[in-house]
Amino acid sequence: MSSSNEAVQKKGSTPRIEVIERYCKGCSICVEFCPTRVLEMETFVVQVVKPEACIKCMQCELRCPDFAIKVHTE
Amino acid sequence: MAYDYEKSIRPGKLPHIWCPGCGHGIAMKGLIRAMDTCGLDKNNTAIVSGIGCASRLPGYMDYCTLHTAHGRAAAFATGVKMAKPEMNVIVMGGDGDGTAIGGNHFIHACRRNIDMTYVIFNNFIYGMTGGQFSPCTPTGDKASTTPYGNPDPIFDISKLAIGAGATFVARTTAFHATQIDKLIAEGIKHKGMSVIEVLDDCPTTYGRRNKFRSVVDMMKRLKEIAVPVAAASKMTAEQLEGKVLTGVLYKEDKPEYCEQYAKVIAKAQGRAV
Amino acid sequence: MAKKVALLQGNEVCAHAAVYAGAQFFGGYPITPSTEVAEVLSVELPKVGGKFIQMEDEIAAMASVIGASLTGAKSITATSGPGVSLKQELIGYACIAEIPCVIVNVMRGGPSTGMPTGPGQSDVQQARWGTHGDHAAIALAPSSCQEIFSETVRAFNLAEKYRMPVQVLYDEIVGHMRERIEFPEPGELEVIDRAKPTVAPEQYKPYDTSFGDVPPLAAFGSEYRFHVTGLNKAQDGFPTTKAELVDDEQRRQIRKVENETARADIEKNEEYLTEDAEIIVFAYGSIARSARYAVNELRKEGIKAGLFRPITLWPFPEKRVAALAKQAKAIVVAEMNLGQMVHEVERVSKGACTIAGVFRVDGEPINPGQIMDKVKEVR
């Protein structure tokens, strides 16, 4: 994806959270459902601000209505 | 692993047309997962819809897709299924499309027990036309055509489906995201007419008129009103006031329509039935 | 070998003709005076492995027919005026999505419930302009039981060839009249199947005009996957609001029927003693039978009358009627309505001759005497 915002962490167990900005409509569902505050809204597009806190619960990916977030765990 | 939704979606068709926070996207993802679970062959599966926000879904899906006229999805789908019973047929659309203008087709598809899976995205409103009340807008709520509160009683879609003869009926909500695909998959596997009602949210035309501060508020509301059928049996009528039952609400085995018609063909051709 | 002969009513003939044409699906709803078409097909279709379904209403019947046709099955429905009114929504769908299907309208009086058991020809303009929006129309009007057979087969052929709904319009008189009919042998009448795509599945576009004005239609359940919608769409089948794409598609869908070659293929008329005729009687369906009788009687009286009978009502035989208007002193249009096709005759005649009408809507057919009187009046 040309407009993807990827946060890659060094720790092997930290997932790569991919945001497809072109799909994101800024509804905030992912931000609100994230139990560890990994995500924040910034001018109507989600940003990955604390990837190291991700516990791979996949709530953001599951609940995103816009196919805009992918949590790559491998 | 991130779920691979792309393989089900036609290249270049996203982003979809739905508003920010619209639950249809969540329900669509559930539908995709369910179709994957059932291993449906893309060439041999039709997705048929009516008109409205939800009914735009088939256009995104890389299957045989049929976006029909307002309310007519079940009737078109009946023609597809009858003519080619070996095809898997998914019907889908919104609450207004399915139960108001399409109400007659809906109940008769249920009555025939034809082998289709009808997924209704019930967001309590006509979204695409700007938020007029539907047969599922709760009594007292505001819509663009009920400025003083909705005087109409509602349809309970699942009860309607059971009463009309559907042999698998289930309900869940956009909040219960993982239950969506489980129930739809069960419906697809069921031989006969299955109806899966997914309560979801329309923040744009329903939420803002009915004092929901955010999409998340609407999601929380869906969580609050849902009561799993098993839990409901232990609750009093008072406790169940304002709640909706979720899970598999009805299931029975009955002769399926295309199989019944195959017997008609056998009789007409003088073969043993 | 002697041909199979039977004494059948028009509606029964229509049903047998549908099977001859290869119909595999009927979706209908009961309505007088068309029900025998459904009844006979409920017997005959399963014999050939076809499907018959009685739907919950007229709209559903039309929807089921379109759905079935999309799987590649030749599909038909039969109804009457009030049913066609309800079906108009989806006749428009079949027009814009370009789905072949046949709609039989056994015409009765109207508007509304009208006179269900009486004949009428009041749906001829409905057949052209009944559904909203701009679209082409093909409608055929047989006037005998034998012709119901051939025209029903032709309706399927035209539906398949031009990828659109085709209406067979005949009035209750022809629908319920019993006549001797000869069943054509298999292969005797041409039977056309829709063009199938030849491109690789990933290259298929359901409205690909590189194959001409009638693009090939794939079947659901084949190796081709595509999208069908009632929205204005681009050649790939997906909705568009781009002005030039919408305009191209709309115009093509009319052009595919109204271009010269297509018109020559679709139009069909019968002319009787028109060569030297000074007065032309324009009549169709059962009334053409009265008109032929009237023409014979008028000739006996030394009046040069002739009959022009459009078998294809739509597209309207513009050129031929215009030519006859130049040749004749007058055209007398006889129809069981209060003047519908007469407007077309007036339009294309452009004032070249007198146009008069014999109209009737009381549930009784127009008799030859009425036509003769009018001819004598305008002569």
Image: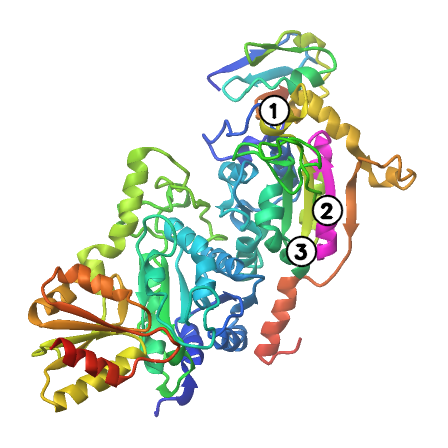
Which quadrant would residue A6 be assigned to in this image? top right
Q: Earlier in the sequence, mark 2 or mark 1?
A: 1
- Residue B91 appears in the rendering: no
Question: At which x and y percent is residue C83?
Answer: 47, 64
Residue with the mark numbered 1: B21
Left or right: B88 as drawn, with respect to C17: right
Query: Label 2 to label 1, Cα distance in Å?
Result: 25 Å
Q: Is residue B6 above or below residue C356?
A: above
Q: Dot 3 surroundings within 10 Å: few (below 14), some, or many (20 or more)?
A: many
Residue type at the position of mark 1: Gly
Q: In the image shown, does C139 or B259 lie closer to the viewer?
A: C139
Above or below — where is C185 with respect to B56? below
Residue B110 bears which disc, if any?
A: 3
* Magenta range: B157-181
Three-letter amino acid code of the residue under disc 3: Cys
Q: Quadrant of the C terminus of chain A?
A: top right
Coordinates of residue B158 in the picture (x, y in percent): 72, 46
Local SS, label 1: loop
Q: Are marks 2 and 1 on the same chain?
A: yes
Q: Position of residue B202 (x, y in %)?
A: 62, 29
Q: What residue sits right under mark 2 in the picture?
A: B158
Left or right: residue C287 versus residue A35 is: left
Is disc 1 surrounded by few (<14), some (14 to 19) or many (20+) residues within 10 Å? many
As for residue B173 lying within the magenta part, the answer is yes
Q: Residue at coordinates 49% horizontally, 28% vertically from top-left?
A: B14
Q: Is residue B265 visible?
A: yes
